[in-house]
Image (cartoon, grey):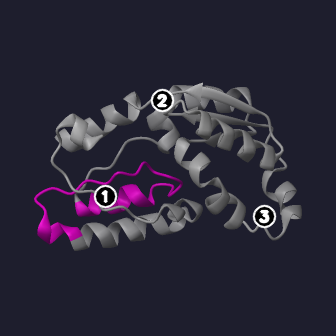
């Protein structure tokens, strides 16, 4: 996305499994920003709040760095209004992104121990009623993986194509600010 947009930047990713432990995100971002500061004129954070309940904002404010807007990546892909409407229509909605579909076995099944203790599925997902996949790329292999992931949760799947426009616009605003 950066190359297509003509942005000159370096990406320094943090482990995606931090999303399973959002209480660790702010500290990890603070550590990375602090380490990168001497080497860069500008550092920005490619995270939404992601379940930090404002802890990430506190770090970003203290370090004078900007971050992506929104409560979570779902807002960036589908728009905050769409996500709010989905949750209002069915509070028991579990959301997928393309990343989560691709990494579902590792980030959900294995990390939650469902591969070893399948009886935990009900404890983790018993209050969910459906899965909505906010897909960025329409791809038959991803669709098959999304179907399998929803089936593993025992939930019906709805697909909403979001594309990358929202994320691209938010990144553009962040990079060009």
Q: Nearer the viewer, mark 2 or mark 1?
A: 2
Residue 71: give x, y in percent of width and height.
49, 44
Write down the quadrant of residue 161 in the picture: top right
Q: Residue at x 32, y 73 (%)?
A: 31
**How far apart in space, not on screen, are marks 3 and 1 (Cα)?**
35 Å
Q: Residue at x 62, y 26 (%)?
A: 85
Residue 27: give x, y in percent of width and height.
41, 70
- Does 71 sit above or below residue 44? above
**How far apart in space, not on screen, are marks 2 and 1 (Cα)?**
22 Å
Q: Which residue is mark 3?
A: 114
* 49 magenta-colored: yes
Query: In this image, 119 relative to 86: left or right?
Result: right
- Does 175 sit above or below residue 13? above
The residues colored magenta run: 36-63
Q: Earlier in the sequence, mark 2 or mark 1?
A: 1
* 33 magenta-colored: no
Q: Which residue is mark 1?
A: 60
- Does 115 sit above or below residue 140? below
Q: Residue at x 60, y 40 (%)?
A: 142
Q: Which residue is mark 2?
A: 79
């Amino acid at each position: 996305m950066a190359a297509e947009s003509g942005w000159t930047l370096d990406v320094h990713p943090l482990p995606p499994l931090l999303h399973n432990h959002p209480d660790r995100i702010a500290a990890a971002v603070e550590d990375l920003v602090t380490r990168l500061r001497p080497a860069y004129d500008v550092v920005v954070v490619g995270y939404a709040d992601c379940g930090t309940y404002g802890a990430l904002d506190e770090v970003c404010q203290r370090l004078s760095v900007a971050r992506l807007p929104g409560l979570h990546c779902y807002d960036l892909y589908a728009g905050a209004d769409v996500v709010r409407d989905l949750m209002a229509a069915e509070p028991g909605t579990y959301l997928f992104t393309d990343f989560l579909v691709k990494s579902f076995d590792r980030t959900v099944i294995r990390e939650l121990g469902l591969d070893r203790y399948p009886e935990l599925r009900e404890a983790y997902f018993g209050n969910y009623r459906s899965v909505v996949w906010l897909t960025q790329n329409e791809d038959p292999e991803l669709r098959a993986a999304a179907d399998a992931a929803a089936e593993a949760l025992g939930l019906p799947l709805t697909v909403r194509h979001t594309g990358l426009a929202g994320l691209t616009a938010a990144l553009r605003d962040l990079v060009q600010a």
